[in-house]
Amino acid sequence: MRGNFVGLVSGLFIIGSTMAQADGNLTEDFSESPETRWDYVADTVMGGVSSGQVQFRSESEVAFARLTGTVSTENNGGFIQFRRKLPDRPDASVSGVRLLVRGNGEQYFVHLRTRGTVLPWLYYQAGFATSEEWTEVTLPLSDFKASGSMLRAIPVADEITSVGVVAFGRDHEVLVDVSGIGFY
């Protein structure tokens, strides 16, 4: 069974599997022990002072990850995130990332790391807006921008090693929910 999203029905993703990865393509609906696959990371690992947490919740039978906290650019900081290291890289045919999100109206980001992002501050980034309503977001790989000149301009699908949802780059309060994330 392919691990890609197959549709949107009644505001909820229907996905091929609740497994974290199938056929080399990440698919996540946060329904089966997501805490075993996803990690919270903040700028405090590099001396920053941002704070937050990721919680795995459910409302009206919809499971989701909720990232909350405060991003502070003090002390060269500026991010909180939840991310997953992929046990297998995606298929070469993958062309982007799809999410189902809601939030507090702020802009958030997806960060991709690849075999070429060997330093902690290297990643590929694409932004998305949030609203109080569940919204489907599609981010083609061509929309992801490299964080430094050491990286190729656009990430290559079968080189991706992790995916993260990130509050980044400016002082703000964070509230973003993600009920589905996958490659397409």
Image: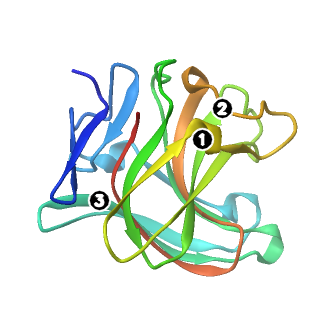
The residue that disc 3 covers is 64
Tell me where residue 79 appears, x and y as whole percent. Answer: 65, 65
Q: Residues within 10 Å of mark 1 (few under 14, many from 20)?
A: many
Q: CA distance from mark 2 to mark 1?
A: 8 Å
Q: Residue at x 60, y 23 (%)?
A: 159
- Residue type at tag 1: Leu
Q: Quadrant of residue 78?
A: bottom right
- Find disc 1 in the rendering and name its residue: 112
Is 117 placed above or below 66 here?
Answer: above
Q: Amino acid at mark 2?
A: Pro
Q: Which mark is residue 155?
A: 2
Q: Are marks 3 and 1 in contact (CB under 8 Å)?
A: no
Displayed quadrant of residue 41: bottom right
The answer to which quarter of the image holds residue 179 is bottom left
Q: Label 2: state its secondary structure.
A: loop
Type of amino acid under label 3: Phe
The extreme right residue here reads 149
Q: Earlier in the sequence, mark 2 or mark 1?
A: 1
Tell me the SS state at disc 3. Answer: strand
User: Which of 13/113 is in front?
Assistant: 13
Q: Position of residue 85 (x, y in %)?
A: 50, 36
Could you tell me how far apart the alpha carbons at marks 3 and 1 are, in whole angstroms? 20 Å
Q: Position of residue 9 (x, y in %)?
A: 16, 52
Give the percent coordinates (x, y) of residue 80: 59, 64
